[in-house]
Image (cartoon, rainbow, N blue to C red):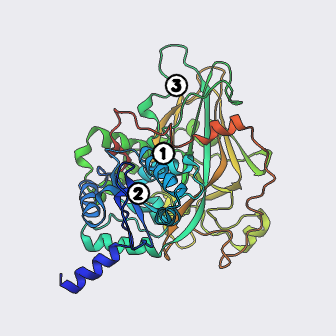
Amino acid sequence: MGDTSRSESKHFLEEFYIPNYILLSDSKHEEVSHVPSCPVLVFINSKSGGQLGGELLKTYRSLLNENQVFDLGEESPDKVLHKIYVNLEKLRCREDNFAIEIYKRLRLIVAGGDGTAGWLLGVVSDLKLSHPPPIATVPLGTGNNLPFSFGWGKKNPGTNHQSVESFLDQVMKAKEVKIDSWHILMRMKSPKEGCCDPIAPLELPHSLHAFHRVSKTDSENKEGCHTFRGGFWNYFSMGMDAQVSYAFHSERKLHPEKFKNQLANQSTYAKLVCTQGWFCAPLFHPPSRNIAQLARVKVMKIKGHWEDLHIPPSVRSIVCLNLPSFSGGLNPWGTPNKRKTRDRDLTAPFVDDGLLEVVGFRDAWHGLVLYAPKGHGTRLAQAHGIRFEFNKGAADHTFMRIDGEPWKQPLPVDDDTVVVEISHLGQVNMLATKDSRSKSVYDPMTPRSQHDGHDDSSEEESSEDWEEKRKFGAADTFKFPHEVDIATLS
């Protein structure tokens, strides 16, 4: 690299650089002459993408201040952000203009799978900052639905200096967008024997590890039941698609050495689709596990009013979608035509309208229609919330998945009920490139929605209930147990 190129690169990187006195509370004040236009904090899951996570970590640390680049295997984002924002607040109180500008302009970069991105999103949500920083996601997993939704691609990135500088340039040019966040509540009867919770800790989706036993003040906590809470940003799914995902994650946990390559991971996933019987679902998937047999489903199309949702008897998988990217970048909802929009009050999917798109699938063959122009699944509803009620039946378990993280969910064996309820919680700030697939209901370039999106007429929540709901993904509660390897988040 010539002297001119080095000089240009140095000046470019200054736009992202954060000095130590902002990052470290015990660091001496530094006189800074240049205010960066796009200061960033970088969080990398060094165990994602085989060896790529570690290589990416080295490159970012060589280009920026190594103290602004964090390895999620060593430091959790809640502690990092808490420390930095406390320091920023102190400096702002001293009227440090540089710190004030850093606070206003700060952006976050997270590199890892969807589970890793969800971890950081949960932390930022729960910290309740007055000016939360927007987040850019580096695709470093297998599905990469979150990065793909916002134009960051779905292939693992290059790790050399040029590739990283190119990504930083995109971060600088990216626009801020708001997306809905969703709260999930799960309630089930306490086990009669043993000391474990109904779900063993390692069976929980890692991105939702804020599921916890809720206090007695919680209105949903009932005698003899455990109540768990969590949150998600992309999708919740149940049924056979989640079963395949669970088989993949289980295999990767047993044989991590076989999952070092993104292409090999996708090939393994495709094989599991076949071996789990997803292509021959009528033969391998008993009718008792079809969604209509497993659960009574209710949706909230009008705020405050629940109504039963009809699920066709052949549907074996149901997806509640917030972003237009599922299973590696597919859009199960598509764009309803004018007749569907008029007759069924369906609209295109928007990421900030306070609505989930609910889609059903019969089998993997049905899923293949998503690869065709205008292909889509069975559109069931758009709703402000959805509720699944599982009663005693032929199946003793089903499979569920949130933002790429699957688990095996036990179902009632006695005359009790397992309830899963999803409701709108709030919004988070993301960064989107010009190639973003996610559309805002408020964007003047997109057709107006027939429904009103958000309104402020929703019921007021008590402060106690909000406090329980608030902790759905982070600050003090979103922690990985020591025995969990974060490689599973890739």
Q: Earlier in the sequence, mark 3 or mark 2?
A: 2
| Residue in view at x 50 percent, y 47 percent | 123
Q: Nearer the viewer, mark 3 or mark 2?
A: 2
SS for callout 3:
loop
Q: Nearer the viewer, residue 437 or 485?
A: 485
User: Where does the image place residue 29, in percent across and percent down from the top left?
Assistant: 38, 58
**Residue holding disc 1:** 242
User: Where does the image place residue 414, in percent across and percent down from the top left?
Assistant: 62, 20
Tell me the kind of residue under disc 2.
Answer: Ile
User: Where does the image place residue 432, in percent across and percent down from the top left?
Assistant: 50, 69
How packed is label 1: few (under 14 Cα within 10 Å), some, or many (20 or more)?
many
Q: Nearer the viewer, residue 339 or 263?
A: 263
Residue 277 in view in this figure: no
Q: Which mark is residue 22?
A: 2
How packed is label 3: few (under 14 Cα within 10 Å), some, or many (20 or more)?
some
Tell me the kind of residue under disc 1.
Answer: Ala
| Residue in view at x 53 percent, y 61 percent | 95
Q: Earlier in the sequence, mark 1 or mark 2?
A: 2
**Residue holding disc 3:** 198
| 442 sits left or right of 332 in the view | right
